[in-house]
Image (cartoon, rainbow, N blue to C red):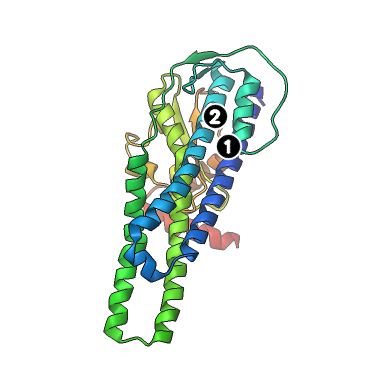
Amino acid sequence: MDSRQQQSDKARKVFRSAQNSLGVEAVRLTLRLVSSMTPQALRKNPAGFVAKWHHEINGLRKKSKKAGQAYYRLERAIWLGRTVDDGLGIRPTMNGLWNDLYGAADMPKVSGVGDPIRLDPSPWSEDNDRESHKDMSTIFHFKATERLKKAEKEANKDFLTIDSLDELDDLLMESIADSLAGEAQKVTEGGGRDAIAEGVLKDPGALRYMRVPEEGACYFCIMLASRGASYRNKWTAGDADVRQFHPNCKCEAVPIFSNDYEYPPEVKAAVAAWKNFGGGNKQQFRRFMAKHQREID
């Protein structure tokens, strides 16, 4: 196997580890935050909750973005022998790029020095905290506020007793917590995914990116992964579905800088699954994959 491919495969796995750790932390923080609230408190002060939630999750999203940038810069150096500026204007070495990614994944760093690598301009824009706060406010509105309002109306209509209302509150808060936790994971890991998508969009050295599904991925993610390295960016790929990563999704966007890049096993399996399907719409593919899974089980 090409040594570049081996390095690339290793980098992708390190990045996946970084993303997974951040996603797990986002879930943990969200569940802890929701568990400290009552339905009444959430209804009376949703802005207060969102401010705390955004502060926690936005910090993780920025770490994910930094990890995505470190991964992107390393992949580019592996395949092109040069990388992009991270905003500091300092020419890194290959070991330095590896250490940036290892640091994002909380892994031991390597020692040694090497020759500085040439830099091309940075493709990344500045963070917009106001926009991310707005996005999380919208998520909270639909995943929590609206459900709390509905539950409150139902409770008043049905004249629930104190005991039954308490039980309803417990079940509802558990459901809301799980829903918000999944969204927090999505927002967090979206930082790294967006860094890669923006890099591919704005960097002339990039060819496109592919979607690499996790083991046991849903039919939707497998369908998108089956298209291989066909995405130039997440808005103009000819299919609005490409920009969708559902809550608890562990798929990743992988930047491609060379036509010599070999698809990972997960993508090869997705390509084979779509080929065996023979064509059709999303719902037909969903039924095809469900049947295939039952046959395996």
Q: Is residue 281 visible?
A: no
Do callouts 2 and 1 mark residues in contact (Cβ within 8 Å)?
Answer: yes
> Which x, y percent locates residue 149?
30, 70
Task: Specify whether 120 is left or right of 146.
Answer: right
Looking at marks 2 and 1 on the same chain, the residue that comes earlier in the sequence is marked by 1
> Which x, y percent locates residue 88?
49, 20
Q: Dot 2 corresponds to which residue?
A: 70
Q: 283 and 53: which one is in front? A: 53
Q: 74 and 33: which one is in front? A: 33
In three-dimensional space, the C-alpha distance between marks 2 and 1, rounded to whole angstroms, equals: 9 Å
> Which x, y percent locates residue 150?
30, 72
Q: Nearer the viewer, mark 2 or mark 1?
A: 2
Q: Dot 1 corresponds to which residue?
A: 15
Residue 40 picture quarter:
bottom left
Q: Is residue 280 above or below residue 64?
A: below
Query: Residue at position x 60%, y 29% from top?
Result: 100
Q: Is residue 66 visible?
A: yes
Q: Is residue 92 above or below residue 69?
A: above
**Secondary structure of residue under mark 1:** helix
The amino acid type of the residue labelled 2 equals Ala
Q: 123 and 224: which one is in front? A: 123
